[in-house]
Amino acid sequence: MQRPDWAPETIDVERPSVARMYDYYLGGSHNFAVDRAAAQAMVAAVPEAPLMAQANRAFLRRAVQFLTNAGIRQFLDIGSGIPTVGNVHEIAQRHAPDSRVVYVDVDPVAVAHSREILAGTEGATVVQEDLRHPERILAHPDVRANLDFSQPVAVLVVAVLHFVGDHDRPAEVLRTLRAALAPGSHLVLSQASDDGRSDAERAEAQKVYQRTDSPLWVRSRAELTAFFDGFELVDPGVVWVPQWRPETPDSAEDAERAVFLGGVGRLGG
Amino acid sequence: MRCSWAESGGSVGEPPAGPAPGAFARAWAKALSGTSYLPMTHAQLEALLQRLTDQLAEALRTEPLDLRAGHRVASELVAAHIASAEALGRTVEVIQLRLVRDLDLVADDTADRMARLLAAIATGYARALRDRTLDEQEAIRRATLTARADAERALRASEARFRHQATHDPLTDLPNRTLFAERLAAVLDGSTSGVHRVGLCFLDIDRFKRINDSYGHQIGDRALVAAAHRLSRAVEPHLVARLGGDAFVILVERSTGTGDVLAVAESALAALAEPVLVGGHDCTVTASVGIVERRVADTSPDDLMRAAGSTLHWAKTAGGAGWAMYDAERDEREQARQALSAAIPGGLERGEFYLDYQPLTSLQDGSVLGVEALVRWRHPQLGVLSPDSFIGLAEETGLIVPLGAWVLAEACREAVGWSTATGEPPYVSVNLAVRQLRRPGLVQEVRSLLRRTGLPPNRLQLEITESMMMGGAEEPVRTLRALADLGVRIAIDDFGTGYSNLAYLRDLPVTELKVAGEFVRGLRAPEAADERILASLVSLAHALDLTVTAEGVETVGQAERLRAIGCDAGQGWHFGRPAPADHILARIR
Ligand SMILES: C[S@@+](CC[C@H](N)C(=O)[O-])C[C@H]1O[C@@H](n2cnc3c(N)ncnc32)[C@H](O)[C@@H]1O
């Protein structure tokens, strides 16, 4: 019997997973030898890779705090990864306990782990879906049950877009998500950029991620800015992530070594 | 950009209430930054470290030194995700370098106490980090197992769905032919199923096409779905499969006899007969069911299905709206007939057919006026077959057309070569089947046959039956006229057994009546009713200018009486049995 096309992939832990590599950069132990080997190869090529991950995660934290202060109580975190430390619902609920978060990831292990972590947690749930099928995410019953799209929602696509190639039409994906949002909703984006990188570093990083299921699609600031089409960029716009509303002035030093560009947009109207 | 976006106004990001961080806590926080991801604001970090600093200071001041304080601080750090080798190194370093100085904690045995405290912190930290690492490794392994189990469950579910689609009819969601065949095969494997008898109801809705034709296929489909659901509900728990179109089959496992299966068939028929409205249209239907019930050991799936199919056909030909029960004898008969009729074309090709002739003898002078051609089949397995065993079949299947054409051609071909010492050779009389008569082109066929063989038209007689002329169809009458115009003789065969309407004979170009043998058999007793009927028949025929031949003449007595009545000719054993042409011709010469 031929395998029907809706059957899921089986779980292959022989291949490094970008979710578990990211956990390793952040200092977590939710990873296997293959993941560590790939992450170490990445560190050999780009020594500040762990710092980049930390800076990105810190950007995510500041962005969520900003959104919580702006009155946002609903979060759709796409490409949420392995909940290590500082998850969106923890940040948001610390200050606004009524916040609701739906995590979405394609990685089945990341989703299974999230599900276990979230068991018994009010207002947070996880869904296995692919950013490249935004209509399926929006139609998912668990998404519908937890988020009210007639009210503002913050969509987080943080450190994920560089896994979505141009052939998968990232701009269209974001447009589809935007169309589902009420005025006052927000979009948080960050992604790896090769602005200011040497060709050698670029090639090395590509090689590492070629081993995973998710090769890297780095983009320029202009490209990332264009993804905010339809949103009003919140100050300071699209910047290296340490520069986005830093808590202390010196934490924004050497910002371009961060590799990640990020920004937050608000849907007007 | 060099400005700070530190939160203003809101509570988010603000340090929890507590003492303002002193110089040591601030230095410690600075030392830790960048060691790993810290899920808190810098202010929160400083506030946390201030609290831990207080605990350490308290420990250093207290006598005796409580090493548990070092363990506690270490595990609090790890619990707050300040959990990296670098963070431990920086922590040891900053405490060693600055704690005593910044907090002004100098005492006699400071160096000693500090060394023991740092050892406790390092031990506690390593222990907590190890536990955390092991926990996280366990968690991710567990997540992998869960994910794998989920994926396999999903795969099984999708396979089940796929299997469902492959084994069910998409319209009615009933099992399809595939599933039915599987179940039947499993049941018939009596060794594993433990089933001894099994039954099938092969069901077909009567004239279902009518619903499609009158209301469209959409209504038709909905009517089918409705029928399917009622059917499966009515015969539960037996398996009902849709074989396609409006044909269904019910599998009765573990039957105890025909009664069981008959009861199922009757419930099915009753359920289908209930009135149904679909889209406001009356879609009430009736159905026919063929029932087969057998010992599992005596049958095979193909066998059962074939038998059920034939039985359904019986139910249909009996008018539908009912069931028929399988009858082995009838089936065998039909199968034999089927086989025989299927062999006719091959037989024709291989020249297995031949003609015998039976004389039509004048009752006046005993001369042979004509001979009737009678077809024989020298069947390779069954021996010589007389027409009764295959003409009916050939008529049903339409094979009578090529067979009849062959007989006609063969009779003409042989007859043209006949000669007699005493003048006119006998004509040859050939039976025409209704299908032959109805086919356009018969006249043309006869004309070219006569031309090709050179047989004079008046030496060919075509025999038709009265029933062929019934119903007032014009076409056959026109054909007969055209044949008569060619000069061919036309006889009505078996006269007296059917409608026997003499009036219509007036309008037909008929030259002869052949009176059925029944009347002749009745001639035994003098002055019998049959004789009087025959006598008036003959005089009527003569009045219409028709000659009369009596069939089935078996005795001298019968021949005498027929002559006395005025009958023109006789045919039957008394005058000669069917035989090859040369035997008969030899007798004439
Ligand atoms: C680098 S992690 C980012 C985690 C988190 N958003 C953060 O910034 O801290 C990227 C995550 O995106 C997920 N991912 C990659 N491609 C994805 C896609 N097409 N749809 C959904 N998730 C995807 C990976 O499985 C991984 O967990």
Image: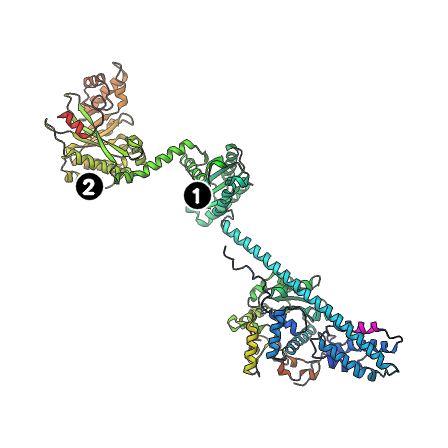
Residue at the spot 69% in from the left edge and 68% down from the top edge? A89
Q: Which residues are magenta?
A: B67-74
Question: How is colour applied across the structure in the image?
Answer: rainbow
Residue A231 at x, y percent in the picture = 59, 75
Instruction: Give the amino acid at mark 2.
Output: Gln
Residue B497 at x, y percent in the picture = 29, 26
Q: Main secondary structure of the magenta part?
A: helix
Is A191 in front, or is B376? B376
| Residue B82 drawn above or below residue A106 | below
Does the segment drawn in magenta span residue B366? no
Is B259 in front, or is B348? B348
Q: Is residue B133 left or right of residue B404?
A: right
| Mark 1 lies within 8 Å of ligand 1 (Cβ measured) | no
Q: Residues within 10 Å of mark 2 (few under 14, many from 20)?
A: few
On the image, which quarter does residue B576 sit in? top left
- Asked which secondary structure carries label 1, the reply is loop
**Residue that label 1 marks:** B208
Is A68 in front, or is B36? B36
Is residue B321 among what the camera can see?
yes
- Asked which secondary structure carries label 2, the reply is helix
Does the segment drawn in magenta span residue B69? yes
Instruction: Give the amino acid at mark 1.
Output: Phe
Q: Is residue A261 left or right of residue B222?
A: right
Q: Is residue B144 left or right of residue B501?
A: right
Of label 1 and label 2, which has the lower sequence position?
Answer: 1
Residue B563 at x, y percent in the picture = 19, 19
Residue at the spot 14% in from the left edge and 32% down from the top edge? B418
Of tags 1 and 2, the one toward the viewer is: 2
Q: CA separation, marks 1 and 2?
A: 42 Å
Is residue A158 among what the camera can see?
no
**Residue that label 2 marks:** B444
Q: Are marks 1 and 2 in contact (CB under 8 Å)?
A: no
